[in-house]
Image (tube, rainbow, N blue to C red):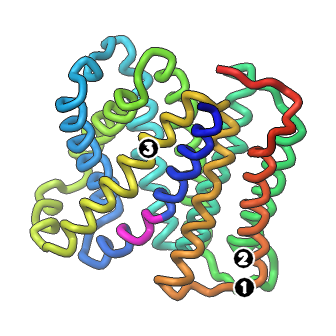
C-alpha cells in the first residue's frame, strides 16, 4: 500500500498543478481572490457530502471536541494558503507562485520532527536543499533569470507555503481518528463557514450565472480540489508527513508547464534547471535505499 501512497500524492500534486488554469479564467470573469477560494471550498464540500450520503453516512460522524483539527485544516490552512496563493498567481507567474507554495516541505519537516518525532535523514535534507535551490532559480531570485516578480507576490507565495504546511500537520492528527474522506469533508465545511461572511456570496451567485464561469467553477471544485485533497489525504495515511509534503512538490512542475504552454510565460534555462532540481528531489525520496524504516 505504501507504493500506492506515492501514486496518490503524486496524482494529487498533478491535479493541484491545474489550479491556475481555472483561477485565471475565473479572474477574467470578474471573480475576486476570496470568491475563487470560496468556489473551491463550497463546491468541494457539497460534492463530498453527496458522495458520503451515497456511500456511508457514518463517515459524517465526528466528535465535537475534534473541531480544532478541522478548524486547522479548513481555516488556518485551506483559507489562508489559498488566499495567499491566488494573490501570488496574480502578482507573479503561475510557475513562480507554485514554487513558492512549496516552501511548505521545509516547514512541515521542522514541525514533524518536533510534533511527530519523525527522524531527520540525510535523504530528506538533500531533497529539501535541492527543492530550495529549485525555488530560487524558478522564482527569478538569481540575477539574470529575466523574471520580474513583485515583493508582494513573493511574500504572498511564502505565506501560501506556510498555510499549506499546516494542512499536513493538522491533517495528521485528524487521520488518527477519522477516514480521509471525513477529514477532507470537514476541512471544506469549516473553510466554507469561514469564507461565506467575507467573500460576497451574492456577487458570487451573479458571477456563476455565466456558463463559462460556472464550468470553470465546477472544474476548480472537483478536478483541482476534491480529487487531489482526497488523494493527498489518503497518501498521508501511509507516508511520513514530511515525505508526503516533499513528494507533492511535483505540482510546480505541472504548473510551470501549464504556464508556458497555455499562458505564454517565459521559459529560461534557469527555470528549466529549477524544475529539474525539484523533480530530482522528489526522486531521491522515492528511492528504496532509505536506511531508516518508516511506519505509521
Towards the viewer: 11 or 113 = 11
Q: Nearer the viewer, mark 2 or mark 3?
A: 3
Q: Are marks 3 and 1 in contact (CB under 8 Å)?
A: no
Q: Position of residue 285 (x, y in %)?
A: 77, 44
Where is residue 75? Give x, y as percent.
39, 37
- Which sits earlier in the primary sequence, circle 2 or circle 3? 3
Question: Height in image: 269 above or below 67?
Answer: below
Main SS category, magenta section:
helix
Q: Which residue is mark 1?
A: 268
The part of the image, by quadrant, that contains residue 122 is top right
**Quarter of the image that includes the N terminus:** top right
Q: Nearer the viewer, residue 181 or 82?
A: 181
Where is residue 163 shown, x and y percent of the image? 53, 44
Quadrant of image for the C terminus: top right
Does residue 111 belong to the magenta stretch?
no
Spatial distance from mark 2 to mark 1, Cα to Cα?
Answer: 5 Å
Q: Which residue is mark 3?
A: 229
Write the residue at 70% across / 21% down: 295
Marks 2 and 1 in Cβ contact (< 8 Å) = yes
Direction from residue 107 to residue 180 in the image, left or right: left
Residue 20 within the magenta-colored segment of the rendering:
yes
281, above or below 108, in the image = below
Residue 287 image position (x, y, % from top left): 80, 44
Residue beneath label 2, please?
271
* For residue 93, above or below residue 232: below
Q: Gap between marks 3 and 1, in whole Å?
A: 31 Å
Q: Earlier in the sequence, mark 3 or mark 1?
A: 3
Instruction: Say what secondary structure mark 3 lies in.
Output: helix
**Dot 1: within a 10 Å radius of its alpha carbon, few (fewer than 14), some, or many (20 or more) residues?**
some
Give the side of residue 252 with respect to residue 171, left or right.
Answer: right
Q: Which residues are magenta?
A: 18-22
Amino acid at each position: 500500500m505504501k507504493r500506492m501512497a506515492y501514486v496518490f500524492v503524486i496524482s494529487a500534486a498533478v491535479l493541484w498543478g491545474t489550479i491556475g488554469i481555472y483561477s485565471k479564467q475565473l479572474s477574467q470573469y470578474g471573480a475576486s481572490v476570496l470568491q475563487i477560494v470560496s468556489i473551491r471550498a463550497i463546491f468541494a464540500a457539497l460534492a463530498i457530502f453527496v458522495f458520503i450520503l451515497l456511500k456511508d453516512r457514518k463517515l459524517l460522524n465526528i466528535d465535537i471536541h475534534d473541531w480544532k483539527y478541522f478548524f486547522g485544516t479548513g481555516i488556518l490552512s485551506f483559507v489562508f494558503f489559498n488566499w495567499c496563493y491566488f494573490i501570488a498567481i496574480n502578482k507573479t507567474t503561475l510557475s513562480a507562485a507554485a514554487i513558492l507554495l512549496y516552501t511548505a516541505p521545509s516547514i512541515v519537516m521542522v514541525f514533524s520532527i518536533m510534533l511527530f518525532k519523525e527522524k531527520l535523514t540525510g535523504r530528506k535534507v538533500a531533497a529539501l536543499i535541492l527543492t530550495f535551490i529549485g525555488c530560487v532559480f524558478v522564482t527569478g531570485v538569481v540575477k539574470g533569470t529575466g523574471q520580474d516578480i513583485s515583493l508582494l507576490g513573493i511574500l504572498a507565495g511564502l505565506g501560501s507555503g506556510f498555510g499549506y504546511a499546516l494542512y499536513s500537520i493538522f491533517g495528521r492528527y485528524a487521520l488518527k481518528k477519522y477516514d480521509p474522506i471525513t477529514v477532507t469533508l470537514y476541512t471544506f465545511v469549516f473553510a466554507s463557514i469561514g469564507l461565506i461572511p467575507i467573500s460576497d456570496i451574492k456577487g458570487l451567485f451573479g458571477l456563476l450565472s455565466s456558463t463559462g464561469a460556472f464550468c470553470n467553477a465546477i472544474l476548480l471544485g472537483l478536478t483541482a480540489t476534491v480529487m487531489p485533497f482526497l488523494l493527498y489525504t489518503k497518501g498521508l495515511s501511509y507516508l511520513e508527513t514530511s515525505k508526503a509534503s516533499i513528494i507533492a512538490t511535483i505540482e510546480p512542475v505541472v504548473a510551470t508547464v501549464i504556464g508556458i504552454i497555455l499562458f505564454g510565460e517565459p521559459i529560461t534555462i534557469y527555470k528549466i534547471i529549477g524544475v529539474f532540481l525539484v523533480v530530482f528531489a522528489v526522486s531521491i525520496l522515492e528511492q528504496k535505499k532509505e536506511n531508516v524504516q518508516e511506519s505509521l
